[in-house]
Image (cartoon, rainbow, N blue to C red):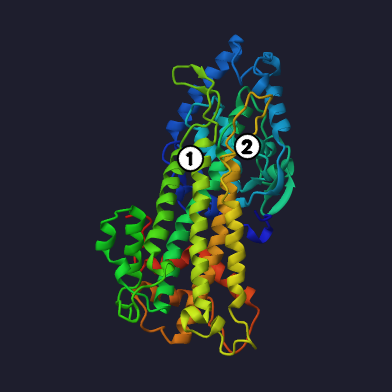
Amino acid sequence: MKMLTKEQTQPLNHNQETIILDGASLTLEDVVAVARNNRQCAIAESAKEAVRKSREIVDKIVEERRVVYGINTGFGSLCNVSISKEDTVQLQENLIRTHSTGYGEPFSEEIVRAIMLIRINSLIKGYSGIRLSTVEALLAMLNAGVHPHIPEKGSLGASGDLAPLAHMVLPLLGLGKAYYKGTLYSGKEAMEKAGLKMIQLSAKEGLAFINGTTVLNAVGALATYDAIQLVKLSDIAGALSLEVHDGISSPFNEDLHTIRPQSGQLATARNIRRLTENSHYITEATPDHVQDPYTLRCIPQIHGASKDSIAYVKEKVEIEINAVTDNPIITRAGEVISGGNFHGEPLAQPFDFLGIAAAEIGNVSERRVERLVNHQLSNLPSFLVKHPGLNSGFMITQYACAALVSENKILAHPASVDSIPSCENQEDFVSMGTIAARTALEIVQNSRRVVATEIMAACQALDIKGYQSGLGKGTKAAYQAFRRHVDFIAHDKDIEMYDELNKATMVLEDSEFLKEIEKQVTLDLQF
């Protein structure tokens, strides 16, 4: 994850429609809107009432001095240690101080905003016993753009994301560090500069803040959203490569795929047909051109498998962003149940799957890059330059892609198969789900760079062949949108390639690129 810089921080936009949080209807698109576009949020009145009723139960427990885990006991293996009514406030602050043990680079602003949003949405379901004023204090931070400094490492994904969420809470108490308008301050300074009041935690509140899957969910949610965009971009890249190589159309016929009706496969074949509609360069099989290689012919099967995996992960994410992952939970009937909803296993395995799905997109794209730059496979000039030898052209773009996909293969090792017991063996099986989410996000980013390289190389090849005017309906839109930002590289002269590759990557990171193409053709995740 990159350090947050002042230049990366956008001003808050108060003119967009406010997202109303009710604990039940938050979508993946809402998370992205708040995390990346600084959408403002408010709590629904129905949710406020649920929070108040839940808190009344906690207050009654404290008043009656009943011994209940998390309210007036120690935590983890110290659950049998009773805490006096007078010490319950100190207990909660101690919990936040001691659990803030994160390490490494801070999470980006967008991830921190997603963390804050998802935690608020969970707490307002009314099963956590937190005061409404305490939840509203976190919401005020989110809306004002006070972003806690949260190190990205240190969570086991059970009991929830304890360490990173403790860092989220520190500024509310005037502790820790936070960014405000792109500058890092002490938590107290950031709150004061934003005109926000600090709070004192009451019984159960510290635990309610930190005992949940919120961090792994936030990181994984953004990774999932980006992976959805990635598989659409990979279809565009594949279609452009298909045009370069005068690819055969029959492997994309619907009749072929309806007899193996895998949803992602069907959707991918349809996407390729739409993208290449009216193309002058997509061909029929001939005695001299009987088959295309797998990386072209099997695009529906390869890309489609990743689409199916990503669709599955999206379903899990949208359940979790509207779930209660606290412990203990306060039922509507007033019962306090100590269970395991904080455990990250339901998302750890999907996020491992997400990383594998994104890695495969990078793998197949890198092979198509090789096919574009290799004269023996393309009948184009070696490395897409006029004078190979004197000029290296696109030679090392493939090297860089190979490095990224090889790194992805290491990152794609499943985190969820690992566990280390903690808390004196009370917490003896953990999910490592936060590691799964972080690595999935990194794999998505690496694969996006590879796909950007493929699109750049494919557009270069199309220019060399003079194929710009006869492209398909969607590939033409993609070529034109890309060329508005990244120029043809004169293939008789070498340049510093990283600048052009960075431009290409930024084009794909900008949602406008996909939007322009989808004005011409619809690109589906599933059939």
Q: x%, y% of residue 417?
A: 57, 39
The relative height of residue 360 versus residue 485 in the rendered view (above or below) is above
Residue at (66, 79) in percent of width and height? 496
Please tell me whether mark 1 sits on a helix, a strand or a loop: loop
Instruction: From the viewer's perspective, tell me whether residue 461 is left or right of residue 80.
Output: left
Q: Are marks 2 and 1 in contact (CB under 8 Å)?
A: no
Instruction: From the viewer's perspective, tell me whether residue 73 is left or right of residue 361.
Output: right
The relative height of residue 181 versus residue 334 in the rendered view (above or below) is below
Which label belongs to residue 321?
A: 1
Which label belongs to residue 156?
A: 2
Residue type highlighted by circle 1: Ile
Residue 247, quarter of picture = bottom left
What crowding class fits label 2: few (fewer than 14 Cα within 10 Å), some (14-19), or many (20 or more)? many
Q: x%, y% of residue 84?
A: 69, 13
Front residue of this view, candidates 231 and 482 = 231
Observer able to see residue 484: no
Observer able to see residue 470: yes
